[in-house]
Amino acid sequence: MNERQESKSSVSKSEKSTNELWNWTARELAHGIRTKVISSREAVISCLNRIDQVNPKINAIVEVLAEEALHAASEADQAVSNGEDLGPLHGVPTATKINSHQAGHATTEGVVAFKDNIASHDSPPIANLRKAGAVFIGRTNVPSFSLRWFSNNDLHGRTLNPWDSSRTPGGSSGGSGAAVACGMVPIAHGNDIAGSIRYPAYACGVTGLRPTVGRIPSWAGSVDADQSLAVQMMSTQGPLARNVGDLRLALSAMSSIDPRDCIQSPVPLIGEPLKRPIRVGLLRDVGVIKLHSSVNQALDAAASYLNDAGYVVEEVELPLFAEAYKLWWLIVLEDIRGMMPMIEEFGDRGTRLNLQYVSEVSAEWWGEPSLEKFKRGYARRGTLIMQLQQFLEEYPLLLLPISAEQAFKQDEDIESIDSGRRLMAAQWPMSAIPVLGFPAISVPTSVIDGLPMGVQLLGRRFREDTLFDAAEVIEAHASISTPIDPKFG
């Protein structure tokens, strides 16, 4: 009998009385473990049982680390008893994304050829979570090479959206979003270069934070491998959770300095108070695509909540976002070009076809790629950043869509080049923000036609605290609640 089987047969009376611990927030669990109201072992067993119950229906966690988690939980409980210093996530069950190195486990990227790519060390974000006391309970699914807003691949299969199996849970952190939404873990790790945290949070009805580039150490791969310029300048690590308070906790845990990151900045998590009343720019239309009525409804609701709380929300125009959205495809696709031989050899059909379509659409805008266009693109990026920074002097917060549509139907990006073009346009808020490098948070608002809706807030660099404050106002009025049971099966 292995440790997991033994644990199921030897759960104490106390553990049985707390078998709904999977429903607790990360803050509640951390406090309960620290004060010995509950044990980390009880929390881990509860989450493992929840995984057993719902993960077969949605396939969010593709590697369950039961024995490892139980061992870590026992060590966490012993540390409490010994009076040791405890991190902010001490003993809290947490999931990590399968595209980042975690010692002793495969960094598969959803690629069959990488199934035995066992990491010898933790990447910086994983190391910070471990140092904060998190207990790693599972690894979450991604699309092949983490290159789609859908989370299915030939190695691990398809992750389903727990609200509607016909819709994407988002990508590339779709497994993390779905796992959090269903109560398998209170916090999951993600990363974001084109919406890979914010979009799964939106599609699954949870919260997700894309921090400022440089806030959390982001060197996610091998220390011996060079990372592309776009990854260094635009990719961030960040958390997904069921509420804003848990995002605050996770950000504090993940922000420790790691010398392996080349641009991390030790900026305090709390800044100077903003001048009141705080002005919020409401950005709807940048001339790319018409918003679905449900998206406008979510924006209207969020604006109303903020106005009632003393913020001053005013509609604004910022055409620079349309330019930044197209610029993403020039800059990042050029970086991906160097990976194309590997993707062509090892990537699945969905990833290859998606890249074909988006490359064809990008070529309609930019023509044949060249070094000169690439250089001009980065030069223009700096100008757009300057323009947005000037705007944020007057409006410290920006309220905008997460996507122009509700969660996409599964594989809509590869139905045709026209569907691919439409999805690219719908995701202009996902693509533009990484080019600009500012922090953004995805916060749910409601459920419309059975699908979660939400909005996005953008703030000044390294002012995630102001995003949290505004997002908590929206969250307090939201008519959506997780965790949920899958709505099917």
Image (spheres, rainbow, N blue to C red):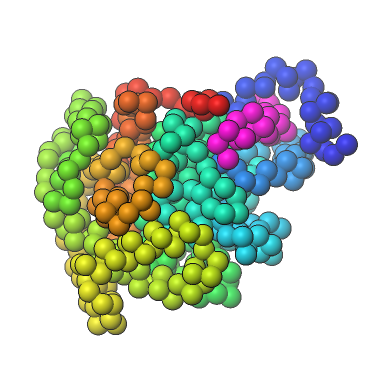
| Residue at screen point 65% across, 60% down | 115
From the top left corner, tell me how far across and down residue 72 is, in percent: 73, 44
> In the rendered image, which quarter contains the N terminus?
top right
Please tell me which residue is depicted at 53% across the width and 53% down the height of the picture. Answer: 153
- Residue 212 picture location, percent across and down: 37, 55
Please tell me which residue is depicted at 48% across the width and 45% down the height of the picture.
Answer: 174
Most frequent secondary structure within the magenta stretch: helix
At horizontal 84% and vertical 32% (from top left) the residue drawn is 6
* Camera-nearest residue between 178 and 347: 347
Which residue is more in the foreground, 169 or 182? Answer: 169
Left or right of 420? Residue 165 is: right
Q: Is residue 375 visible?
A: no
Residue 84 percent across, percent down from the top left: 71, 43
Query: Looking at this rendering, what residue extends furthest in the right direction?
Result: 1
Give the answer, above or below, for where 120 lies relative to 368.
above
Answer above or below: position of 251 versus 475.
below
Can you tell which quarter of the image residue 445 is in?
Answer: top left
- Quadrant into which the C terminus falls: top right
**Spot occupied by residue 412 in the image (x, y as percentages of width and height):** 36, 47
Q: How many marks?
A: 0
As for residue 51 lying within the magenta part, the answer is yes
Is 423 within the magenta?
Answer: no
Residue stretch in magenta = 34-59
